[in-house]
């Protein structure tokens, strides 16, 4: 599972159902034959439920039996760890390397700035949540499967797969410094084996959301304009899907960033 928003959506859809959650919990106890699963969770639409879980990468199916995939097992373990007051433990984590992967791309929110895509190895996976308190404006989003951090206008997103995107960068020198700082911060915590205690959620200013909206004020979302839409979005009173313009290919990158920002809600 790469942390791609489409894949995250598949996981969310797969787990938005009581029967499929029961299947996951049952498989957490060990591999099972399909008949056993049917006897435990019910046989109605079982094939369909298993298919959705497989499509989301949460389980594997083989010759009449099912098992949790590695991703599914990590997912269950991460859920089990939620709600505990333990300090985030990084003692098992290895130091990371971060390499810039792609050329600087124009940043849609501000064409005078740039965007980079980099890769973190080893991929942080489940340790991402523990890294959240390292960043003054850090927020781990289950929905996106990513840790989002903000410093001024710069938005950094670290996905569980290791993909890292940084937006609103002035130049290549700034990109290198940001990647170096990111590595230093994470490896500093890994060397100590523990991250600071979790903090309260941060709020995103609607103007930060507005920057990524089409700014046409067309009103198709039912709001007076894009800024009102941004305020309602951050208040949880509307959804990105209400803006049809964002579905157009030219707004694909903006939509990706908006999904990330809306994770602060
Ligand atoms: S539909 Fe989208 S572009 Fe149109 S006003 Fe609403 S947020 Fe702005």
Image: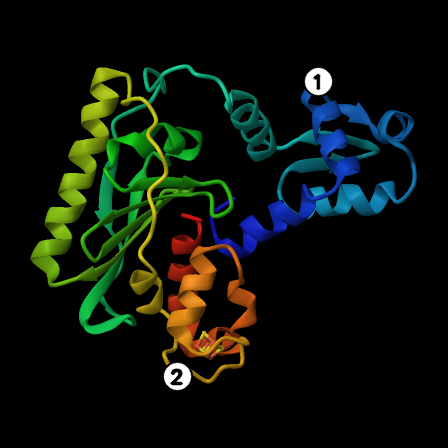
Of the residues tagged 2 and 1, which is closer to the observer?
Answer: 2
Rendered image coloring scheme: rainbow
Find residue 234 and report its image quarter: bottom left
Note whether residue 87 is visible. yes
Which x, y percent locates residue 22? Answer: 76, 30
Sequence-wise first label, 2 or 1? 1
Instruction: Locate residue 54, reporting x and y percent.
Output: 69, 43
196 lies above or below 234: above
What residue is drawn where x is 28% and y is 70%? Answer: 109
Please determine whether, in this image, residue 255 is positioned above or below residue 166.
below
Q: Which residue is mark 2?
A: 216
x%, y% of residue 137? Answer: 27, 42
Q: Is residue 103 visible?
A: no
Residue drawn at x 11%, y 60% is 172
Callout 2: few (<14), some (14-19), or many (20+) C-alpha neighbours within 10 Å? few
Q: Is residue 166 left or right of residue 19?
A: left
Disc 2 residue: CB within 8 Å of ligand 1: yes
Dot 1 corresponds to which residue? 29
- Toward which corner of the image does residue 201 lie, by quadrant? top left
Label 1 crowding class (10 Å Cα cut-off): few <14, some 14-19, many 20+?
Answer: few
């Amino acid at each position: 599972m790469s942390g791609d928003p489409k894949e995250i959506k598949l996981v969310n859809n797969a787990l938005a159902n009581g029967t499929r959650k029961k299947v996951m919990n049952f498989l957490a106890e060990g591999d099972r034959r399909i008949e056993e699963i049917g006897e435990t969770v019910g046989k109605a639409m079982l094939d369909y439920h298993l298919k959705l879980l497989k499509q989301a990468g949460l389980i594997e199916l083989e010759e009449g039996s099912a098992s949790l995939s590695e991703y599914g097992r990590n997912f269950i373990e991460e859920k089990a760890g939620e709600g505990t007051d333990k300090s985030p433990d990084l003692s098992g984590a290895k130091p990371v390397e971060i390499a810039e992967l792609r050329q600087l791309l124009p940043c849609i929110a501000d064409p005078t700035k740039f965007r980079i895509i980099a890769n973190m190895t080893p991929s942080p996976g489940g340790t991402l949540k523990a890294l959240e308190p390292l960043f003054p404006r850090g927020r781990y989003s289950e929905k996106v499967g990513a840790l989002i951090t903000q410093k001024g206008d710069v938005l950094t997103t670290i996905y569980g797969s290791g993909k890292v995107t940084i937006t609103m960068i002035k130049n290549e020198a700034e990109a290198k410094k940001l990647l170096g700082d990111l590595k230093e911060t994470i490896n500093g915590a890994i060397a100590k084996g523990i991250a600071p205690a979790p903090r309260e959620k941060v709020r995103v200013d609607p103007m930060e959301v507005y920057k990524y909206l089409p700014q046409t004020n067309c009103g198709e979302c039912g709001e007076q304009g894009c800024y009102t839409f941004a305020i309602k979005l951050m208040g949880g009173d509307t959804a990105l899907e209400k803006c049809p313009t964002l579905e157009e290919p030219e707004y694909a990158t903006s939509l990706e960033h908006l999904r990330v920002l809306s994770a602060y809600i």
